[in-house]
Every structure is written in C-alpha cells, then in structure tokens.
Amino acid sequence: MKFFIDTANLDQIAEAEALGVLDGVTTNPSLMAKEGITGRDNIIKHYVDICNIVDGDVSAEVIATDFEGIIKEGEELAALHEQIIVKVPMIKDGVKAIKYLSDKGIKTNCTLVFSPGQALLAAKAGATYVSPFIGRLDDISTDGLSLIADIRQIYDNYGYETEILAASIRHTMHVIDCAKLGADVMTGPLSAITGLLKHPLTDIGLEKFLADYKKGNN
Ligand code: E4P
C-alpha cells in the first residue's frame, strides 16, 4: 500500500518523508489556503517545493472547470515537474479532460469521487488514480469504507489499472480498513501515519527491556 500525506505543510511533508515510508503527497485548494499559499505564482512555486522534498507523486489540482481550461491548466501543471499528477474533479468536463490528458501520457488523479459509478467513469477515462473521499461520506452517515470495497470489486472484475487512492482519511483505523479492503494508496494527515506506530504494549515492553538492561549493566 502506498502512503501519501494529505497536506501542503512543508514541515509535515518533510517529517513524513524522513520517516522513510512516504510515497507521495496530495494537495487541494483548501489545503493550500490553510498554509496561506495564495496566488497562482506562489501556488506553482509551492508545488515545486513539495516535489523537491518528496520522492514520489505529487497531486496538483486544477481550478478550471471547463474542458479547455482544465487541459490547459493540466498541461501547465504537468510541465512543472515529472512528479506532478494532475488532479481533476469528477465532473463531465473533468472526465473528458482526464481522457484527453491520459491519451497524451499525462498522469491524473480524479478527485471528489463519492460513488462507484463515478469511479467506473474515472477508470474508463484512464485516470491514474481515483480518489474516493471516505471521511466525508462518514461525515454524512454513509459508509465510506463500503465505497472502497465496491470500487475494488468493480476494478478487479474488469482489470482496470486505475489505482484506488483512499482519500479523506481521518485516522489510523481508516488506514487499516482501507489496507484490508485492498486500496492501492491512502492519503491522510501526518497523524494517521504516525498513529500507526503507537501501541501501549510496545511502550511498556521497551521500558522493561531498558530497565532490565540497566540492572544487568550497573
Ligand atoms: C484528497 O486528495 C483530498 O485532498 C482530501 O483527502 C480531502 O480530505 P478532507 O475530507 O479531510 O478535506
């Protein structure tokens, strides 16, 4: 399973990269705004800064919502760095643009996916990644994880190569459940990654090992 971090915060990206388990980064306009990155030039520079920290795919989201605008922006973003994946929303012109960009060899991430039908369209259009937002489905009392299971089954039935990028991950159990269901990738906050480290028996066990070592070496 690939681990992506879902943030535009350079310190957190660097911390996850230093852990040695990071495979990429996803961003979106809200995450950029949260870090105070505004204006096209600053946003472009920030994408390049992220690419220089991580060794992996970096999703950069288009703002345009019409076909011509999406492909223009997508081609510009893709030209920034070889690690850039063009993130395109699941709308009619977005699907057309994913097909166009995929045919040109530009990698895409179809975002804002909330149903199996949308995921099927993304795969047929040739998206590199599809991003089902499980946390936001949970937020409205709908089972986000069952969407991952449905997409896995559909993609396996037909051998679609689009990778399932479980997005809107909120906590460690989302990560574990998505791994059990066969999601190819998860993207979440740093806490969802570092949270996997934690177990009280590990802390207790380590404390005892160190105390016993000290006793024998005094
Ligand atoms: C995915 O690529 C999105 O950036 C993200 O996972 C959305 O997560 P949120 O629902 O926590 O905003």
Image: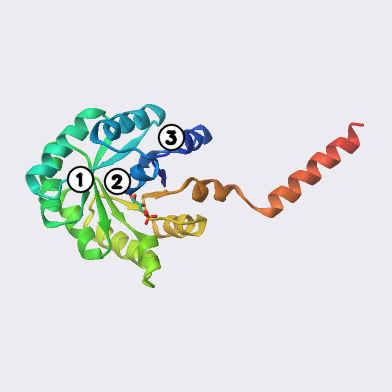
Residue 103 in view of the camera: no
Q: Which mark is residue 11?
A: none
Q: Is 205 situated above or below 73?
A: below
At mark 1, the secondary structure is: loop
Depth check, front residue: 20 or 72: 72
User: In x, y percent, where is residue 187?
Assistant: 39, 48
**Three-letter amino acid code of the residue under disc 3:** Leu
Quarter assignment of residue 91: bottom left
Q: Label 3 belongs to which residue? A: 10
For residue 74, side relative to residue 165 (left or right)? left
Q: CA distance from mark 1 to mark 3?
A: 22 Å
Q: Label 2 belongs to which residue? A: 29
User: In x, y percent, where is residue 142?
Assistant: 36, 71
Task: State which tag comes first along the sequence, 1 or 3.
Answer: 3
User: In x, y percent, where is residue 60?
Assistant: 27, 40
Q: Which mark is residue 63?
A: 1
Depth check, front residue: 78 or 65: 65
**Three-letter amino acid code of the residue under disc 2:** Pro
